[in-house]
Structure formats: C-alpha cells, structure tokens
Image (cartoon, coloured by chain):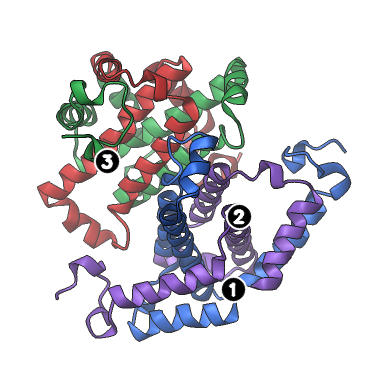
Chain colours: A red, B green, C purple, D blue
Amino acid sequence: MDDLVKAVLRFRDERDWRQFHNPKDLAISISLEAAELLEQFQWKNPAEVESFLAVPENRRRVGEEMADVLILLISLADAVGLDLAETARRKLLENARKYPVERAKGNAKKYDALAP
Amino acid sequence: MDDLVKAVLRFRDERDWRQFHNPKDLAISISLEAAELLEQFQWKNPAEVESFLAVPENRRRVGEEMADVLILLISLADAVGLDLAETARRKLLENARKYPVERAKGNAKKYDALAP
Amino acid sequence: MDDLVKAVLRFRDERDWRQFHNPKDLAISISLEAAELLEQFQWKNPAEVESFLAVPENRRRVGEEMADVLILLISLADAVGLDLAETARRKLLENARKYPVERAKGNAKKYDALAP
Amino acid sequence: MDDLVKAVLRFRDERDWRQFHNPKDLAISISLEAAELLEQFQWKNPAEVESFLAVPENRRRVGEEMADVLILLISLADAVGLDLAETARRKLLENARKYPVERAKGNAKKYDALAP
C-alpha cells in the first residue's frame, strides 16, 4: 500500500495536479468512478454477470474502474490528511464490534437489526 | 495492503458472508458508500469544507466513509479474482501514458482534449 | 406537471432557499437521493424485491425517495432555466430515432450495438 | 405530466422493453444517469458552472441528462405501481411539516438540526 500511495502522489505532483484536488471534487469523482464500475453490471442477472466476468477483457475493464476509485481514495486521503490503510484497519475493528461473529454468522441483516 | 486485504477477507469469512458477496451487489454497495462520503461535502463551499475538516470528529467521519469504500473494493477484487493493488499500479502506468507530464502539467483538461 | 413545478418552487421560495440552490450542489443532491433510492434494493434478489414491494410501507418508502429525486430535478431545471417536461419530451423523440421499433423490439442492447 | 407518462410508457411498450424493467435495475440506471448529470459540473467552481451553463449546447446536454433521470423515474413508478406526481405532492406536504416556514426561512440546516 505504501508504494502505491507514493506512486499515486508522485503521479499527481509531477503534473502539478495537487491544486485541483479539493476534497469535495475528489469525493464527486469517487462517486462518478463508482458509478462507472456499477455500470459494468447494469441489466445483468447473476448468470450474465458470471459469463461477463469470465471474459478476461471484461474483467480487465472492471479492474480499471476499481483502480480509478482506489487512486482517487488515495488522493482524497492525502488531501484530507488521513492514513487510508490505518483508517480502514480501525473501521474493520469497529465493524467487528458491531457484527460479533456469533450473531452475524451467515446472517446478512444490518447490525442494528440483529437480535440482541 | 496485503495485511489489510487479509484482515478484510478474514472478517468476511468468520461471518460466512462470502455467500452474499456477488459482484453486482458489491458494486452497488461501493456506489452507495461513495454517496455517503460525498454527502459529507454537500452544500459546502471551499471555506466551509476547510473548517468542517478542521474538526477532528468530522475528519474521522470522512475517514470512516472512505474506509467503507476501500473495504468493499477489497471484497469485490476478491470476488472477481483481481489483485487490487497490482491493478491500480497498472492503471497508473496507463494514466501516465495518457497524460504525459510535459502536456498535462498544471492542466486539468481531460486527456483526450489535450493538444497533440 | 405544471402544478407540481409551481408547488416545488413555492415551497422553496417561501423558505428563501433559492440562494442555496446552485446547480452543482443540486446535481450532487440528485445523485445522493438516487443512491438512497437504490439502497432500498441493495442485497435483494428479484424474489426478495417483489416481496419487499408487496409491503405498502416499503412501497411508500420507495416512493418517498423517488419524490425526493423528482423535486430536486424540478429545482435544478428552474435553476438552470430549463422546462423539464419539454426537455424529457424532446429526449424521448431522440431516443425513438436511436432505437427504432423494428430493431429495438424485445432487444435490450445499447443502441450503438444494434445491427444496422 | 400525464402526457409525458403516457409517452414514456408507449415508447417502452412499442419496444417490448417492459420485460427488462425490473425495479432494481431501474434504480441502478437512475443512479447512473444522476452520475452523468453530476459529471457535467465536476471540477468546476461556481463561476465556471455559470459560464458553462451560458453556452446553449452545454445547457442542452445538462437537460438531456436530467431527462434521462426523469424518464427512468417514470418507468420505475410504473414498474412499482406508484403515481409519481401524486407521490411528489405528498412528499412536499411532508417536507412542509418538517421545515416550517418560520424556522426554515433562509436556513439551510437539515430539519432535525433546526431549533425547536
């Protein structure tokens, strides 16, 4: 992750793009790239998703859209002054408290709807 | 990144949630979490974004939404069979070809609108 | 539609909210409300969607999210100086040209992928 | 609105597209079209939005994206069995209760944050 973060920031700085990277527009971009990712699955039922993803070119395209989201997340984390990986690790710990294994196992219900 | 990926997949597998993680619904979730991230900046002008982010509790909240997106990206990468970090590295190389430093420097125009 | 447009603009003006309605933030809001609408269907397969929508309270909730999108569309149309209904009618005519009945019938392919 | 609804449903039925219009995929499409609308405003500050919208061709493009959202909303309302205009009218009444004029006037705060 460290290497990837460095590469993303180097790419940005070599192009003097830091000046454009205000947090609000980066958040908009993340949302738009997430939509382009979702677009790959639009109008497809599970069987169609599966055969779509069996084609390497399609899987590569899906990967590109995911990469765009990740690259922008890294840019936003830097603009906001957050350590993205550390933030995700803390969120996982919090999720583990919200969804204890014994109650969440095999259960997709939202944590606040889980039986106490 | 490797450790984070392992932690995300362990969290999922301890809860038997792999069965729910079809690619289309994961892509929907990424899009919804990206919207929750964007919501933090809604109706705020640049000065308001800045003072909002100066409050640690707000920055923590923004970090949580970013973490949700990243955790889901990692889950989708696994469901689709992609190495997320490697995919992002390849995308950066491709972006470097599309936006050569000498033409893109200080220029926010979309690559296909850059002068040849 | 005319009555609805008038009611939306009257609601806004009685509260002096015109000043907040810049096009970019309205477009963000439309996107966020569309996400809340989509959230209603998250993680549900077709059978689950059907039984979810058979419950009046759920259908009411879906309707509320759709109403939020429509109210914001009307607000944006006013902020931008467009007649929303007229714009939609023109778009339908354009779509009719792109997807001629004889080729599009029963065929979900994107128009540019339709056989000539 | 009635005429527009009829035109949208006639367009759909002439092409036998009712079969593809399941609520979940329609909600996805609404979200994707809302993203395309938002994309028009990406990376633009208020002055840039204004000069962008002063160009008729750009305003036309924005209108097309708005029309796509509205046409899909109408399709979803039909698929779900809701009267879209009536639903929006009821939502406006509910909003009027949540945001009473005397407290909401000139105040953009979310209703639940308004002083009692």
Viewport quadrant of the C terminus of chain D: top right
Circle 1 residue = D82
Q: Is residue A81 left or right of residue D116?
A: left
The local crowd at label 1, few if under 14, some if 14 to 19, many if 20 or more residues have their Cα within 10 Å, is some
Q: Amino acid at mark 3?
A: Glu
Between marks 1 and 3 in the image, the one whose residue lies nearer the viewer: 3
Q: Quadrant of residue A43?
A: bottom left
Do the residues under discs 3 and 2 have CB atoms within 8 angstroms? no
Circle 2 residue = C72
Q: Residue furthest left?
A: A56
Residue at figure coordinates x 44%, y 29% from the top left: B66
**Residue B10, visible in the rendered structure:** no
Viewport quadrant of the N terminus of chain D: bottom right
Query: Where does residue C31 sit, x and y in percent of width and height?
Result: 50, 49
Query: Where does residue A48 sit, x and y in percent of width and height?
Result: 22, 61
Q: Amino acid at mark 2?
A: Leu
Residue at figure coordinates x 28%, y 25% from the top left: B6
Do the residues under discs 1 and 3 have CB atoms within 8 angstroms? no
Residue at figure coordinates x 18%, y 32% from the top left: B98
Query: Where does residue B12 sit, x and y in percent of width and height?
Result: 36, 35
Which secondary structure, mark 2? helix
Q: Quadrant of residue D30?
A: bottom left
Between marks 1 and 2 in the image, the one whose residue lies nearer the viewer: 2
**Same chain for the residues under marks 1 and 3 in the image:** no
Q: Amino acid at mark 1?
A: Leu
Circle 3 residue = A65
